[in-house]
Amino acid sequence: ALLVDLEYGGADCTNAMRVRIDEAAQFVELLDTVLAARAAGGTRYRYAVYDTIDRVEEFAITLATQTYKESVLGKTFDGLSVLDLPKGGGYPHFWSKLKELLVKMMQSADHVLVLELLAPYVCASKALEHVEGRHKVRVALEATGLLRAVENSGAVVVLLRVDVAADR
């Protein structure tokens, strides 16, 4: 099993093959390396665990912003995030990067487990609401149908209920 620790040492207590990722570029490099090894008949993981999808969302924003700033359209953009573009203009860039990362994650092992920490959520009929608006990914994935695509691919999204401070 491969455990990709994206959340500040949250998997220190496990004995699995663990990779600590701190930056978006590292995450993309890891995914590309794992996929290249699978394609070449090399190391093939039966299980991959990604802890947590919240960091994947942050990486998608970072990568979308970087890609946008490198484009002709965004060469003069000096904002911190592509999501700061007027009239929601950055969201298509974000969704494209998020989907790209999710597809690579789903292809990285025979069985994929994606963890998500839930703070004070209300879970009702597979819909999630959050008072403060954190952890938008699952709600947005459900709205766009991407979550169904993730789950239909054989990946599993595990929702871990934890009581944490809102400023975590």
Image: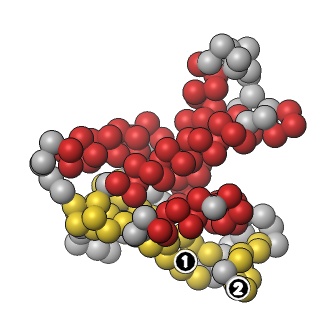
Quadrant housing residue 77: top right
Please tell me whether residue 81 is drawn above or below residue 167 in the rendered image: above
**Is any part of residue 168 visible from this angle?**
no
Q: In front: 118, or 90?
A: 90
Please tell me whether residue 122 is drawn above or below residue 82 in the rendered image: below
Q: In front: 139, or 24?
A: 139
Residue at left offset 15%, top offset 42%? 40
Q: Of all residues shown, which one is farthest toward the left? A: 42
Quadrant housing residue 159: bottom right
* Residue that badge 2 annotates: 125
Residue at left offset 57%, top offset 72%? 117
Mark whose residue sits in front, 2 or 1: 2
Q: CA distance from mark 2 to mark 1?
A: 14 Å
Residue 159 badge:
1
Q: Of all residues shown, which one is farthest toward the bottom? A: 124
Q: Amino acid at mark 1?
A: Leu
Q: Amino acid at mark 2?
A: Ser
Q: What is the secondary structure assignment of the residue under circle 1?
A: strand
Q: Residues within 10 Å of mark 2 (few under 14, many from 20)?
A: few
Q: In front: 147, or 71?
A: 147
Left or right for 13, reference 77: left
Q: What is the secondary structure assignment of the residue under circle 2?
A: loop
Left or right for 155, reference 76: left
